[in-house]
Image (cartoon, rainbow, N blue to C red):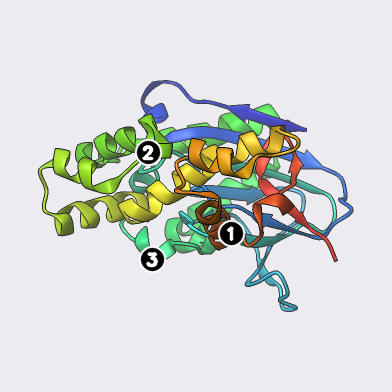
Amino acid sequence: MFLRHRPSGPLALYVDCLWYSERGALPHTRERSLPTGCFDIVVPLLQDHLIRYETEQATDARRLHGAVVQGASDRFGVRGTEGASAVVGVHFRAGGAAAFLGGALPELRNRTELLEDVWGPAARELREKLQAAGSPRRALQLLQRELLQRLRNATLPDPLVAAAIDAFRRDPASARVEPVRNDSGCTPAQFIRRFEQAVGLTPKRYARVLRFGVLLPSLARCGPRDWAQIAVGAGYYDQSHLIHEFRELAGMAPGAYVPVQPGQPMHVALRP
C-alpha cells in the first residue's frame, strides 16, 4: 500500500507531499536510494528502527531507532529493507525543510540522522502518536497537524532562493547556474551561501540532481534505448557525459537501472 497526500494552503509552500508506505517482506534486503536534492522525514511505525549502510558492500548496518531526517542528497544512499515495513513520512520541497529543521541544512547533506537530535523529545512523542493513529489516513492527518503547528513560528522561504529554484525547475535539462545567479543580483559567493543555507546543496549540485531526477521516469518507462538521443534530450553533452553523471549519482551504469516499481523511480534493488 502506498498513499500520498499533497497539502494545500500555507504548508504547500514547504512540503511536496506526505506519504504512507506499507509492504510485506521483499526478495532483496538492500536498496539504493537515488538522490532527490530535497529533505525527508521518515517515521518507522512497524519496526523500531531504520537501517542504513555506508556502501553497497558494507557489512556493518547503522540502525537508527526512531524517526529520522534525511538530508538533501547529491549521491545515492543504501538502505536496508529486511522484513515487513510500515512507514510514514514527509517529502519537503527544495528549500522547504529549513523552516522546520533550523539552520544546519548543509551539514546534513547526504546524511540520515535521528529527528530527535533536531526536535528533541517531540520527535519521539510524534512517533508514538502516529503508531497509535489506527489507520494510515489518520497518521497522515496527525503528521500534517504537527507540521502546521510548527509552521506558526516558521519564517517564509528566502524569496531569492525560491525564485532560483523556480528558474531551475522550469527547464531542468538546460538549467545553468550563472544566468540564474545574474538574475538574482547577488555576488557568486552570496548566491551560493544563501542557496546552500536554504536547500542544503549548492546551486550547481542542486541543478545537477534536478536534471538527473527528470531523466529517471523516462528510463523507467522506455524499452530499448537510444542513449545518444536520450542524453541530448535530457541536457547532457553526449552519451559519455550521461553515463558519467549516472555513475556518480546512482552508483551504476544507466543500462543497469531498473526501479523496484515503475511508480518508485528513486529506489533500485541491490541483489547479491
**Residue 58 is drawn in which quadrant?**
bottom right
What kind of element bears circle 2? helix
**Of residues 136 and 20, which is closer to you in this image?**
20
Q: Is 166 on the left or on the right of 28, as rendered?
A: left
Residue at 63% from the left image edge and 58% from the top image edge: 66
Residue at 42% from the left image edge and 33% from the top image edge: 148
Which callout, 3 or 2, points at the residue further toward the start of the chain? 3
Residue 199 visible: yes
Question: Which residue matches tag 2?
Answer: 174
Mark 3 or 2: the one toward you: 2
Residue 53 percent coordinates (x, y) = 67, 69
**Of residues 81 and 155, which is closer to you in this image?**
81
Residue at 51% from the left image edge and 64% from the top image edge: 111
Question: Which residue matches tag 1?
Answer: 76
**Of residues 39 and 133, which is closer to you in this image?**
39
Q: Quadrant of the N terminus?
A: top right
